[in-house]
Each structure stands twice: as C-alpha cells, then as structure tokens.
C-alpha cells in the first residue's frame, strides 16, 4: 500500500467511543511508521458534541489530537472526494445494525462493540467506564496494528479484526 490505510470508526453519536478509536488509531498507527494509518470517526446520528470525558481520557493517557475532534455524520465519508476508506470499524451495536451508505471502494468491515460510557452516572462511574472503553479499544487497535496490514487483502483484514474482537475480554 503506497498511501496510509484509511480507517473510519463509526458509532451512532460520534461523541465517545468512536472519538477514542480515531485518536488511538492515529496515535498508535503512526508511532513506528509515520503515515501508516489515517483514522477518522463519524456517526449515523451525530450528537454534535464530543463528550468531554472522552477528551479527558485521551489527555490522561497523553494521546495527542492532530486537530480538534468534532462529532460528524458518516455522510461526509460517502461523497465524491472523501478519503477512500479501507476499514470501517463499528464500536456500538446500533451503528453496526444500521443501513450504512454505500462506501466507495467497498472497505473491509469489523464490529468491535463496546458498552457506551457516555451516559453512565455518576461522573466517577462515567470516568471509569471511559477508562474501560479506552483500554479495550487500545488492546484491539494494538493487536490490529501488529498485523502486516500493507500486504493483507480486505477479506484478510476483516477476518483478523473479527478474530481480535472475539479474543478480547
């Protein structure tokens, strides 16, 4: 692959789990080989706001953000001129079950469902829930990035991503 692997992390609201996934893919995927991964996030019904505890969790772990994250619609990635997505990762059950746009290039897909930390109460429990989601996503992303992605087909990536999810605690 001569260009970065483009990853789109999807969730319904694009305010919590998908924001964590985008930041982790971008940070971890470019540490050893800059330009290897370019990640984005989006939602089927974007909330319009990024959950502040998601940003707090990323900052706590020293995960830099290339630009200010924003809650956006997946429609931005299904139009002419949008980045060609190689891998779609859904992180919530509702986004995984929704009718998605037709993605140019027919990317590989994976479902890494995680409980939604955004509405956990009280605040201390919400912070713990975000920490759990962060750890789970980080472990899956690290396992995925350890693969020889540059030589894998879309079907191979899909199968590997599914195996990573099934093996996750």
Image (cartoon, grey):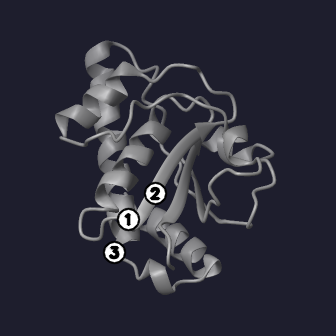
- Name which residue lies at 49% across and 28% down: 70
* Left or right placement of residue 11 versus residue 124 in this view: right
- Residue 52 rendering spot, x and y as whole percentages: 36, 20
- Real-space CA distance between mark 1 and mark 2, rounded to the nearest whole angstrom: 7 Å
Q: Which residue is mark 1?
A: 35
Is residue 117 shown left or right of residue 46? left
Q: Position of residue 120 (x, y in %)?
A: 41, 21
How far across and down, in percent of the image, does residue 157 sit?
Answer: 55, 75
- The answer to whether residue 120 is left or right of residue 139 is right
Measure how far apart labels 3 and 2 are at the Cα level: 16 Å
Element assignment for label 1: loop
Mark 1 Cα within 10 Å, few/some/many (few <14, many 20+)? some
Instruction: Please say if the residues under marks 3 and 1 sit with CB atoms less than 8 Å apart.
Output: no
Front label number (3 vs 2): 2
Q: Nearer the viewer, residue 158 or 74?
A: 74
Residue 165, label in figure: none
Which residue is rendered at x = 49% and y = 40% of the image? 18
- Residue 41, percent from left and from top: 53, 42
Residue extending farthest top: 122
Q: Nearer the N terminus, badge 3 or badge 1?
A: 1
- Which residue is found at the position 68% from the left and 40% from the top? 76
Q: Quadrant of residue 63?
A: top left
**Residue occupied by mark 2:** 38
Q: Residues within 10 Å of mark 3 (few under 14, many from 20)?
A: few
Question: Crowding at label 2, few (<14), some or many (≥20) Cα neighbours within 10 Å?
Answer: many
Q: CA distance from mark 3 to mark 1?
A: 15 Å
Q: Secondary structure at mark 3?
A: loop
Q: Are marks 1 and 2 in contact (CB under 8 Å)?
A: yes
The C terminus - image quarter: bottom left
The residue singled out by tag 3 in the image is: 146
Q: Secondary structure at mark 2?
A: strand
**Dot 3 or dot 2, earlier in sequence:** 2
């Amino acid at each position: 692959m001569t260009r970065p692997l483009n990853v789109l992390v999807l969730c319904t609201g694009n305010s919590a789990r998908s924001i964590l996934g985008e930041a982790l893919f971008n940070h971890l995927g470019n540490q050893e080989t800059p330009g290897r991964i370019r990640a984005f996030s989006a939602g089927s019904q974007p909330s319009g706001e990024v959950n502040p505890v998601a940003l707090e969790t990323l900052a706590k772990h020293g995960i830099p953000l290339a630009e200010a994250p924003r809650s956006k619609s997946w429609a931005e990635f299904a139009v002419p001129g949008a980045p060609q997505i190689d891998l779609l990762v859904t992180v919530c059950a509702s986004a995984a079950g929704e009718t998605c746009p037709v993605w140019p290039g027919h990317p590989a897909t994976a479902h890494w469902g995680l409980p939604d930390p955004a509405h956990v109460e009280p605040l201390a429990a919400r912070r713990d829930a975000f920490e759990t989601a962060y750890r789970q996503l980080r472990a899956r992303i690290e396992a995925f990035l350890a693969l020889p992605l540059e030589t894998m087909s879309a079907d191979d990536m899909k199968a590997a991503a599914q195996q990573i999810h099934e093996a996750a605690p």
